[in-house]
Amino acid sequence: MHELLSYFKNLEPELIRWLTDLINTDSPSSQKPELDRLTARLALQFSEYGAAIEIVENREAGNHLIARVIPRDSHRKQILILGHLDTVWEVGECQRRPARIENGKIFGPGSFDMRGGICLMLAVLHYLSTHRDELTRPITLLLDSDEETGSLTSRALIESEALQSETVLVLEPCLPGGA
């Protein structure tokens, strides 16, 4: 465990850079071009860490992103890590309120919901890119583009991936009490 904690502590400057960059990227639910640009950017980054990428085309909203890391020899069910790309903020919000660090915390549009969770996904893939031989079951990351508007175009995709999974980890944050 100490080795794992040390790995992610050493990754902290990169995590801060990733989170700041994501906070400073607009991706409102209603803006397909911004969502698709973010999808493409994350797809490239995920693939650099060894994930197989699938972009699920969507004409009604932004495209959805699936990244898979499959061990060399495993017949076990996958672990699904779920999150979303869209935010409630309109285009220009990240320019009005860019990411800022105060007292060891990062603030800005989407920092809590859901940019921090996306950074955790990046960190997991970063780790697996150098420790793939430790992987004992497939890992699938699914980022949908319409969670903030009810997941209307992604619901069937989420349900399909969930049915193929042993466990689903939703990196959507919650407040005390589960709200």
Image (tube, rainbow, N blue to C red):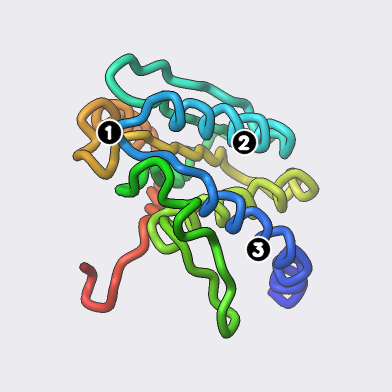
Which residue in the structure is indicated by mark 1? 159
Which residue in the structure is indicated by mark 2? 69
Nearest to viewer (mark 3 / mark 2): 3
Toward the front, the furthest residue is 96
Can you see residue 72? no
SS at mark 2 in the image: strand
Q: Earlier in the sequence, mark 3 or mark 2?
A: 3
Q: Earlier in the sequence, mark 1 or mark 3?
A: 3
Where residue 151 sits: x, y (%)? 24, 36
Indicate whether 11 appears above or below 67. Answer: below
Q: Earlier in the sequence, mark 2 or mark 1?
A: 2
29 on left or right of 35: left
**Picture quadrant of residue 6:** bottom right
The local crowd at label 1, few if under 14, some if 14 to 19, many if 20 or more residues have their Cα within 10 Å, is few
SS at mark 1 in the image: helix
**Which circle marks residue 21 in the picture?**
none
**Picture quadrant of residue 153:** top left
Can you see residue 121? yes
